[in-house]
Amino acid sequence: MRGMVLPLRPTCLPCAHTRLRVTLLFLRCRSFSTGSGSGPGSRLGIGSTGRSRTELPHHPCRTRFAPSPTGYMHLGSLRTALYNFLVAKATGGQLILRIEDTDQTRLVPDAEKRVMQDLKWAGLNWDEGPDVGGKFGPYRQSERLPLYHEHAKTLLGTGKAYRCFCTPEELDVYKRTRHEQSLPDHYPGTCRHVSPEESKDRASRGEAFAVRFKVEGKAATTAQDIIYGQYTKKELEEDFIIMKRDGFPTYHFANVIDDHFMEINYVIRGAEWLVSTPKHVQLYDAFGWQPPKFAHLGLLVNEDRQKLSKRFAGTTLSYYQEKNILPAALLNFVLLQGWGQSQGKPNIMNLEDMIANASLKYSKGDIIVDTRKLWFFQDKHLRRALEAPPPGSFNRCSIDPILKETLVIPIRTIIDSVQHADETEQATKAPVPPAGLDLLSIQLPVSTMQLSTDRLVRERYVLAALRATKPPDAEGIAAWVADNRYLFWRVPDHLSGLSLAEAAFPAEVSLGGTKTGTLDAVQYVLDCVGKVPVETWTEETFEKLVPAMAHYITMVEGAEEDKHLGFRLMRWALFGSVKGPALGKVMMVLGRQETIKRLEVAVDTITKVEGWGRK
């Protein structure tokens, strides 16, 4: 069989245009001194030049994606990772992957591995992380405990933190009592007044304790945010825990320590952390460090305004991978969930385009996610991939790895499963499809299977079939295989006559103005196609030949007009249906030998129907 395979455009790395853009940014902004300070703030310049706070800075951004391995990635976490990736790459900076595994009681064994797999699947590669290393590692918080203990001791030594010996049971009773009295349940500062000597003595005797940060004053704390502007927390802050009784840091403490020592200068995260940002600012101030710039993203919610999270199966990345969604389509979809796109910018973007158009212009407030729109992006990206120009002939070209893993192999697997289900049956019996493939309950003798036994040839054939047809939609790839089954199997003989009757072709047709029968019309198509040699069996040939043949076959004078008679007749002859994909593309997929074989079978079928189709 013959056909053509078209290459995909690369979509995962910054293009030359983007690299040039970053170089120009450096040349334009060499006057922005990075300074000699140890903290990230020494390299910040936004705000001092009158630039909009949502524009990208004129210096490299170090961003981080810091998932907790207590579950799997979902749409919200993918969007956070994407935005951090884009800001880093668009400014010539770095993306850091940090695993925040301080909540040891809720860890999911394979979550960290899955996070890395999902990010790689999406093409969001990181510059530093647990697997690739870096000069600011280790990149798992559970491996950085000495650093947290050291800085907790620093705060204890300066009187900005204290040991809290209150047991969890005591605190629960206190909070329950306050709640029953409709009173605030903030920590009352029981251990705040324990002297340093007593505190140290009790700790040395093995009494369990947490470490609390001492919040000074009663004024509400503020934090500056790129999206929300100046944020002020209305409630008074309690003395919050920075080191837990198990020796692990809280999220807030580890977050600040790590962002500082990893030199993160832009923190882009979900809006649920905005309320905690004043705590973080207090910690930065306590150490005398400059905070990074903060950008808090509006939460993704469903139609009931429930936050999308790892607990909802329909939002996890594995769910969309199982639906055979292309990574570029899913990224394009989540990109527009809260990104304030500039007017006139394209909606359909691959990763390369996203980097070129990156900004810090994000929406405030919750974003209701309508996943039905995802299929629009899937269709656009799949068509873009399939329509890329071919590098060579059908049998010699390669298959893009992403398209291969996402669609080609799953489709080939479905076809194989139908074939294998029939291998234990006689050739004239219908196959028994595997469980879950009810859509493929069609009568197909295994002897009519047209694909090569070579796996690579089969995969190239599937790719050619994808290019010749309407791509799979929300109904799934099993439905697509069922709809296009006769691209993979010949029409069984016992169904050819039935489909001929259902087509309801007229007994008499006009062939170039001469009244004749349908048999002669199909024979005419066979003769024309048979004259096309292998050397000119190309899409260009059939772009001219197919319309010419179709227009040569018309209704006889006086009959009701049917402009599509010729096309319908050829479609029936090739795959037993009057509807289907473009005929020229179908002939390219089937190849010369199979196309001629099917036309010969069509002639035989009409001949066997006594008294019909002949003049």
Image (cartoon, grey):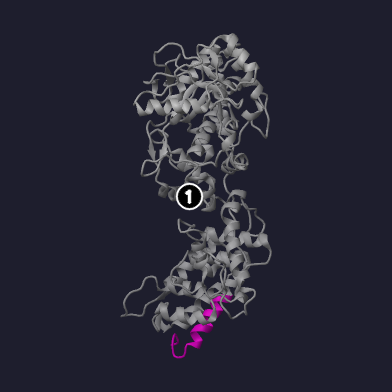
The answer to whether residue 55 is visible is no
Numbered range of the magenta stretch: 597-615
Q: Quadrant of the N terminus?
A: bottom right
User: Which element is circle 1 on?
Assistant: helix
Q: From this view, report whether residue 380 is shown above or below residue 423.
A: above
Amino acid type of the residue tagged 1 in the rendering: Gln
Relative image position of residue 227 (x, y in whole percent): 41, 26
Q: From this view, report whether residue 534 is shown above or below residue 257.
A: below
Residue nearest the viewer, comparing 2 with 545 = 2
Q: Quadrant of the C terminus?
A: bottom left
Relative image position of residue 576 (x, y in whole percent): 48, 74
Which residue: 37% across, 40% down? 305
State how many labels appear. 1
Relative image position of residue 372 (x, y in whole percent): 41, 50
Is the residue marked by circle 1 packed among few (<14), some (14-19), or many (20+) residues within 10 Å?
many
- Residue 376 lies left or right of residue 465; in this view the side is left
Which residue is under mark 1?
378
Q: Main secondary structure of the magenta part?
A: helix
Residue nearest the viewer, comparing 248 with 351 = 248
Residue nearest the viewer, comparing 305 with 91 = 305
The answer to whether residue 452 is visible is yes
Residue nearest the viewer, comparing 435 with 266 = 435
Tell me, yes or no, whether the highlighted magenta stretch contains residue 610. yes
Q: From this view, report whether residue 86 is shown above or below residue 121.
A: above
Relative image position of residue 44 (x, y in whole percent): 52, 17
Dividing the picture into quarters, in which one does residue 510 lie?
Answer: bottom left
